[in-house]
Amino acid sequence: MVTVQKDTMVPNAVTLVIEREDHTVGNLLRMCLLEDKEVLFSGYRVPHPLEPAIQLKVQTKSEDPGPVKAVDTAIERSVATLDKIGEAFAKAKARH
């Protein structure tokens, strides 16, 4: 489950609470978001080690495309990258 909380103090910023995820997904999305030239800030934190959730904070330069769209794009790019890695692995596995 993902919850989007608009930041009332910082313009063009949201915090996404992503349940049942940890540093693996948080760091992947953070790094992918930082490659986007429209993203000013991207960071995540795990509120508590026993709480299975991350909080991903994203701020963009403007509302268009906006932070939610930036996260959507980062997810699409991450999936595409993982697909390429999976294909390369399958080819390498077939050679052995």
Image: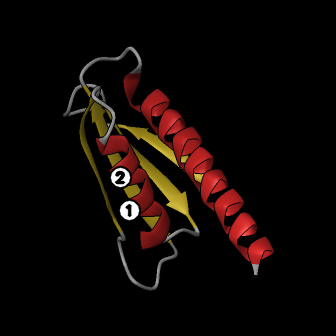
Label 2: how many residues lie within 10 Å, few (<14), some (14-19) or many (20+)?
many
The answer to whether residue 65 is left or right of residue 89 is left
What residue is at 19 percent from the left and 34 percent from the top?
Answer: 9
Query: x%, y% of residue 81?
Result: 56, 50
Would you name the residue on which mark 1 appears?
A: 27
Query: x%, y% of residue 39?
Result: 28, 33
Secondary structure at badge 1 equals helix
Q: Quadrant of residue 75?
A: top right
Three-letter residue code for mark 1: Asn
Q: Are marks 2 and 1 in contact (CB under 8 Å)?
A: yes
Q: Can residue 38 be seen?
A: yes
Q: Is residue 11 above or below residue 19?
A: above
Name the quarter where the N terminus is drawn: bottom right
Q: Tell me the tag on residue 30.
A: 2
Three-letter residue code for mark 2: Arg
Considering every residue shown, the one lying at the far right of the view is 94
Q: Pick the residue in front: 65 or 55.
A: 65
